[in-house]
Image (cartoon, rainbow, N blue to C red):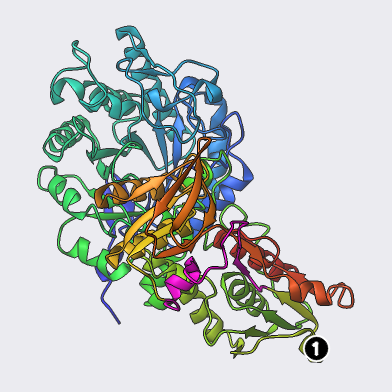
């Protein structure tokens, strides 16, 4: 068995002893209520994480005053009336052997009056370029000296509430472009008084906050400080400046540093790094901070694999590893790692679809691979009272997840897949550059269904006649979707192919290519062709590319295509394909791209519902549909529906 023992050695953070080196990174959930109170949903979520073996849970960023609230249903830390809810949460986590920290913060200029009803504030009146939560551009009001002093006191009061509420520590959020970072960073702080100037002046606000938290919560109450070691924007915090700030934090009484990076505005998108960013991306930065402080340092940022995580500790590059999305994907990551069950860990793929992208829609977050997140109570797996024989038609993500959960419940399951291998659209989705990790979704599911004894029938297309011969109690259709054929004149020409055929390697592509459609599939296909040395032009009828994905992916493709000199034509609707090229309509003008060798369609998908339509009447009550065969969407909806139906059978 691989050696991970360093990961599971105890460590002290101030007076607090942690049972291992795996802690939870704070993640906004939208699980609180509108006033910021703890809810049963938030408690269930944290209890489930604690049960998985993590040494310390950390709550989401909890606003210390009402104008500092950034998320519609974010947890609050602004009033003593929140303390009874804290006690419910901390008692529940302690009841399963866990420890928990309250993260306290203020969003500063990243807040919006659409959420708070109040004008944002900041060290100066500089506007943030970030526009994911709301689209409204607001100039923050520059804080007066009296307001800064009052804000320091609000942080201190929040620290006191944390202790009175039963939290084991408090974490001060001084990263990611929120109010404390706005003071620390020369990118956003242009003050000329004692809270501005060089890094010493800019760190005054943080130093006073640590001091006030220690004063009000108690000198012995452990304080963690989350700091940006690199802002990844011009004029922002650099590692050299961060080392100075970290030393100041330790001098003021901080008991640990969480070494993070990035703003929402950073390019590349480093704050919550997507799969296009390498894993373990920030280790060198935590190592720099460890050189200069004598308190524990945690590293964060795509900590995926436990053996490598243990090596980080062993090599002295960090004292703790902070997992965020990794614990969403698999809350039992620590327990499975400690027991050597590495192949059973459902590793985060960095897709950001269920977590950060969903939050940007002001919805409670979840996980593409793990729909139990936020649904811990209703999605608890219970053995079936009467095991059934279940046929699942389709071996993509929806069918595989349905099979996994149904088998865990004790059902006898058979998957029928028309192709000679399982995976569905994931098989081609993992082909483009920097997208191989997508394959982990079905790699994990395939491994699990095999271990659970699910029977698989590959290369077998199920027909309506075959359905009649299946001796089963229930049938689940997960037959997926096929490419949509748009209404474009000349669409049937021989040089017109589908993106899925390109990624499958089933077609020959010329040198000059037009990709019609700039959703995620079209962009990934274009990226794949660039790697093959093709000249690529992209047509998109909407006014933005990557409209079906979040900021992280959009930034990746914008930067990638700018670097490669790819022409992306927005508000451009393809109307005809002929022997000369592609005709398109752009802002009322008809234009043409000439000398096109191949046209690639990435214009969406339509459900494969023919089997359902053929049998639904005579199999009423016995047959169920999930995933793209209901409506063409993405893997997150497919896995959720597969997981849900298997719990209901």
Pointer 1 local density, CA inside 10 Å: few below 14, some 14–19, many at least 20: few
Write down the quadrant of residue 58 in the picture: top left
The percent coordinates of residue 640 (x first, y second) are: 62, 61
Q: Is residue 564 above or below residue 497?
A: above
Work out whether residue 649 can be spotted. no
- Residue at 48% x, 48% y is 540
Quadrant of the frame with the N terminus: bottom left
The image quadrant that residue 649 belongs to is: bottom right
In the rendered image, which residue does mark 1 sit on? 465
Number of numbered labels in the structure image:
1
View extreme (front): residue: 579
- Residue 386 screen position, x and y as percent: 79, 80
Q: Which is the main secondary structure of the residues drawn in magenta?
A: loop
Q: 228 or 521, which lies in front?
A: 521
State the SS at label 1: helix
501 inside magenta stretch: yes
Percent position of residue 17, x then y: 32, 52
x then y, percent, for residue 82:
55, 30
Residue 325 shows in the view: yes
The magenta span reads 478-507
Q: Does residue 644 sit above or below 29 in this rendering? A: below
**Is residue 15 located in the magenta-colored stretch of the structure?**
no
């Amino acid at each position: 068995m691989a050696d991970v023992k360093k990961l599971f050695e105890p460590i002290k953070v101030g007076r607090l002893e942690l049972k291992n080196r795996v802690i939870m990174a704070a993640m906004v959930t939208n699980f609180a209520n509108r006033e910021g109170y703890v809810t049963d949903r938030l408690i269930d979520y944290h209890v489930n994480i604690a049960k998985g073996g993590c040494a310390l849970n950390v709550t989401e960023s909890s606003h210390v005053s009402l104008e500092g609230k950034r998320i519609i249903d974010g947890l609050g830390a602004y009033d003593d009336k929140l303390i009874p809810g804290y006690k419910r949460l901390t008692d529940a986590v302690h009841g399963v052997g866990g420890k928990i920290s309250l993260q306290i913060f203020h969003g500063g200029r990243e807040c919006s009056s659409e959420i708070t009803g109040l004008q944002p504030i900041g060290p100066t009146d500089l506007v943030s370029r970030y526009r994911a939560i709301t689209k409204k551009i607001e100039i923050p009001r520059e804080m007066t000296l009296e307001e800064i002093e009052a804000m320091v006191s609000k942080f201190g009061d929040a620290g006191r509430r944390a202790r009175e509420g039963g939290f084991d520590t408090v974490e001060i959020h001084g990263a990611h472009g929120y109010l404390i970072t706005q003071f620390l960073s020369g990118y956003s702080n242009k003050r000329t008084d004692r809270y501005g100037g060089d890094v010493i002046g800019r760190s005054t606000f943080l130093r006073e906050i640590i001091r006030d938290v220690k004063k009000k919560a108690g000198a012995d109450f452990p304080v963690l400080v989350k700091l940006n070691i690199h802002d990844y924007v011009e004029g922002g915090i650099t590692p050299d400046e961060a080392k100075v700030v970290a030393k100041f934090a330790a001098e003021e009484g901080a008991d640990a540093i969480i070494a993070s990076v990035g703003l929402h505005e950073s390019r590349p998108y480093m704050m919550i790094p997507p799969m296009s960013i390498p894993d373990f991306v920030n280790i060198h930065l935590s190592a720099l901070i460890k050189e200069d402080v004598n308190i524990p340092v945690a590293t964060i940022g795509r900590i995926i694999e436990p053996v490598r995580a243990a090596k980080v500790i062993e090599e002295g590059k960090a004292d703790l590893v902070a997992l965020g999305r990794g614990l969403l994907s698999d809350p039992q990551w620590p327990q499975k790692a400690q027991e050597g069950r590495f192949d059973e860990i459902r590793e985060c793929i960095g897709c950001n679809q269920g977590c950060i992208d969903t939050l940007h829609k002001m919805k409670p977050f979840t996980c593409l691979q793990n729909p139990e997140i936020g649904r811990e109570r209703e999605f608890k797996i219970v053995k079936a009272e009467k095991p059934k024989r279940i046929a699942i038609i389709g071996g993509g993500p929806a069918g595989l997840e349905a099979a996994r959960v149904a088998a865990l419940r004790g059902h006898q399951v058979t998957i029928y897949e028309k192709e000679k291998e399982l995976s569905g659209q994931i098989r081609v989705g993992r082909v483009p550059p920097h997208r191989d990790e997508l394959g982990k979704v079905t790699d994990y599911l395939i491994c699990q269904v095999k271990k659970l004894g699910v029977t698989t029938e590959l290369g077998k297309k199920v027909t309506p006649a075959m359905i009649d011969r299946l001796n089963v109690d229930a049938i689940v259709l997960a037959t997926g979707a096929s490419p949509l054929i748009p209404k474009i004149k000349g669409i049937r020409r021989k040089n017109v192919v589908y993106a899925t055929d390109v990624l499958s390697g089933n077609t020959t592509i010329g040198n000059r290519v037009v990709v019609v459609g700039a959703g995620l599939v079209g962009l990934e296909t274009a990226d794949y062709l660039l790697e093959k040395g093709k000249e690529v032009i992209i047509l998109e009828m909407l006014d933005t590319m990557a409209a079906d994905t979040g900021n992280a992916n959009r930034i990746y493709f914008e930067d990638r295509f700018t670097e490669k000199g790819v022409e992306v034509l927005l508000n451009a609707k393809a109307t005809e394909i002929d022997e000369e090229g592609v005709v398109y309509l752009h802002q009322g003008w008809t234009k043409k791209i000439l000398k096109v060798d191949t046209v690639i369609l990435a214009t969406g998908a339509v459900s494969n519902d023919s089997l359902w339509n053929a049998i639904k009447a005579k199999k009423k009550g016995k047959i169920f549909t999930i995933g793209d065969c209901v409506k063409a969407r993405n893997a997150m909806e497919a896995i959720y529906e597969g997981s849900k139906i298997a719990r209901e059978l």
